[in-house]
Image: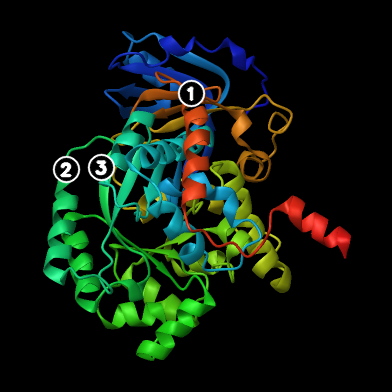
């Protein structure tokens, strides 16, 4: 990327950025393509889709009817894809701090059970707003146990303007419902969002032991037929691995393979505790993984071997697990966790060479959540889901290797604009077309009510209480 410094405030006003169906000829300082940042490149967008990418001079010559929309001081790059989220858990994000693993039983299930339709909608929209502010244009929601219609979450993400892979929980191991009715509901869910421009149906099972073998096989079949995903938390915690060994004599991924549930339709969330055999099964079956490094640091037992996955050709994206919605910090955590867990011990000073984490935060993530043909890169025929990143700030202006610097020095403050399906959804940290601060105020009110109502059990006190306890000692 060239070293010319332009004034990023010379951008067109928000109302002039891609208003209407287009076409528009966008001319940033550079475009981030799979091969790296390319100077002198332009992008044509029309009807929410990228129509062409190429040299700015050439596109200007072949489309003389288009007035160039110049974007000085900015990199146009693909939006981030969050491959694993729990949108309706945003009211309790801070409740996970300092907690031991497997908090879903003590915190998340009780919290979601305390949400009504308004609070579920507000919690999901709040999470969507945070994701947009962090540069995510797609989030994969792994389903919820609120008891409200899943379409409430679909409405919240549509209203926020973010693309969503929407999971329907199909747990039935302890339910009175039989397998056919669970699978009927799964089939209806997959058909419900056909043709929806922003919501893409997915199925979900909390953990393998939460569903019967018939449902695990059935959801895999339905998802494969529909070109959708099944999201399952697997090999996340030692307790879950040991329960599988006691119950089946096999580890979770081995068991899913045994019953025929592995395959390209499966999105395995976390997959932190993997044996070489399980790595081979993932690679051989084309199963995808969501690598969630921040979740590992905050409440996990291990870090997924993502550099080894990349070497083995295992499909994977990066997921927040609802921890914090900042795509740049997620990419940084992905590299940092690999360096601490694996790179230092082996003398690997590269740990993915920067580009690996950008790749799997964007195009690789889109592939993992089943949307490779829809989003994840800036390419003709794909949705116009992209960011405008200010590269004139102190962290990025003196660039020698922009992909590395985006991973290590990028942050949400450098994102000027977020576009999803060709529409401006966020401008300088504020949503367009709806009142973000009003949503945050209402979320704060509803969160207090929900947390007070929910039978949450925490092991660790608040940070101030912990300080008082330690001081007293």
Q: Quadrant of residue 46?
A: top left
Label drawn at residue 151 = 3
| Sequence-wise first label, 3 or 1 | 3
Q: Quadrant of residue 156?
A: top left
Q: CA distance from mark 3 to mark 2?
A: 13 Å
Q: Position of residue 113 (x, y in %)?
A: 38, 54
Residue 100 visible here: yes
Residue 359 visible here: no
The residue positioned 47% from the left and 19% from the top of the image is 27
Tags 1 and 2 touching, CB below 8 Å? no
Tags 3 and 2 touching, CB below 8 Å? no
In the image, residue 388 above or below residue 149: above
**Which of the image's four quarters has the N terminus?**
top right
Q: Judge from the rendering whether residue 263 lies leftward or rightward of residue 385; answer left or right.
A: left
Q: Position of residue 29 (x, y in %)?
A: 55, 23
Q: How is the image coloured?
A: rainbow
Residue ID for mark 1: 438
| Sequence-wise first label, 3 or 2 | 3
The residue positioned 34% from the left and 52% from the top of the image is 146
In the image, residue 75 above or below residue 259: above
Q: Nearer the viewer, residue 445 or 285?
A: 445
Q: Nearer the viewer, residue 80 or 75?
A: 80
Q: CA distance from mark 1 to mark 2?
A: 32 Å
Label drawn at residue 306 = none
Residue ID for mark 2: 194
Q: Residues within 10 Å of mark 2 (few under 14, many from 20)?
A: few
Q: Comparing marks 3 and 2, which lies closer to the viewer?
A: 3
Q: Nearer the viewer, residue 310 or 430?
A: 430
Q: Position of residue 151 (x, y in %)?
A: 25, 42
Q: Residues within 10 Å of mark 1 (few under 14, many from 20)?
A: few
Q: CA distance from mark 3 to mark 1?
A: 22 Å
Q: Residues within 10 Å of mark 3 (few under 14, many from 20)?
A: some
């Amino acid at each position: 990327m060239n070293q010319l410094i332009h004034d990023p405030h010379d951008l067109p006003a928000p109302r002039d950025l891609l208003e209407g169906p287009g076409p528009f000829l966008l001319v940033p300082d550079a475009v981030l393509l799979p091969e790296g940042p390319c100077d002198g490149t332009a992008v044509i967008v029309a009807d929410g889709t990228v129509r062409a990418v190429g040299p700015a001079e050439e596109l200007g010559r072949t489309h003389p009817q288009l007035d160039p929309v110049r974007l000085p001081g900015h990199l146009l790059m693909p939006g981030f894809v969050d491959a694993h989220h729990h949108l309706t858990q945003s009211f309790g994000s801070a409740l996970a701090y300092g907690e031991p693993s497997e908090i879903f039983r003590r915190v998340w299930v009780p919290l979601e059970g305390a949400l009504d339709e308004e609070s579920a909608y507000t919690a999901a929209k709040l999470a969507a707003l945070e994701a947009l502010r962090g540069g995510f244009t797609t989030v994969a929601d792994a389903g919820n146990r609120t008891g409200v219609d899943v379409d409430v979450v679909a409405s919240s993400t549509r209203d926020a303007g973010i693309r969503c892979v929407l999971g329907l929980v199909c747990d039935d191991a302890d339910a009175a419902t039989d397998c056919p009715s669970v699978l009927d509901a799964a089939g209806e869910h997959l058909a419900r969002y056909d043709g929806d421009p922003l919501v893409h149906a997915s199925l979900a099972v909390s953990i393998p032991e939460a569903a019967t073998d018939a449902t695990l096989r059935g959801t895999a079949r339905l998802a494969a037929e529909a070109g959708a995903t099944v999201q399952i938390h697997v090999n996340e915690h030692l307790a879950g691995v040991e329960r599988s060994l006691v119950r089946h004599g096999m580890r979770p991924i081995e068991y899913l393979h045994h019953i025929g549930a592995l395959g390209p339709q499966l999105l395995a969330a976390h997959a932190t505790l993997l044996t070489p055999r399980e790595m081979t099964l993932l690679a051989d079956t084309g199963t995808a993984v969501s690598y969630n490094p921040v979740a590992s640091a905050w409440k996990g037992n291990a870090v997924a071997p993502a550099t080894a996955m990349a070497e083995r050709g295992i499909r994977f994206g990066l997921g927040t697990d609802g921890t914090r919605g900042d795509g740049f910090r997620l990419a940084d955590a992905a590299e940092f966790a690999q360096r601490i867990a694996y790179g230092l011990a082996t003398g690997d000073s590269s740990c993915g060479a920067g580009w690996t984490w950008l790749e799997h935060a964007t195009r690789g993530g889109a592939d993992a959540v089943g949307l490779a043909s829809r989003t994840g890169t800036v390419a003709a025929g794909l949705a116009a889901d992209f960011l405008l990143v200010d590269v004139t700030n102190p962290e990025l202006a003196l660039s020698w290797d922009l992909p590395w610097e985006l991973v290590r020095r990028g942050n949400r403050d450098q994102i000027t604009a977020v576009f999803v399906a060709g529409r401006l959804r966020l401008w300088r940290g504020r949503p367009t077309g709806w009142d973000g601060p009003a949503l945050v105020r209402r979320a704060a009110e509803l969160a207090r009510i929900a947390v007070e109502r929910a039978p949450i059990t925490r092991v660790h006190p608040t940070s101030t209480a912990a300080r008082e306890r330690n001081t007293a000692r």
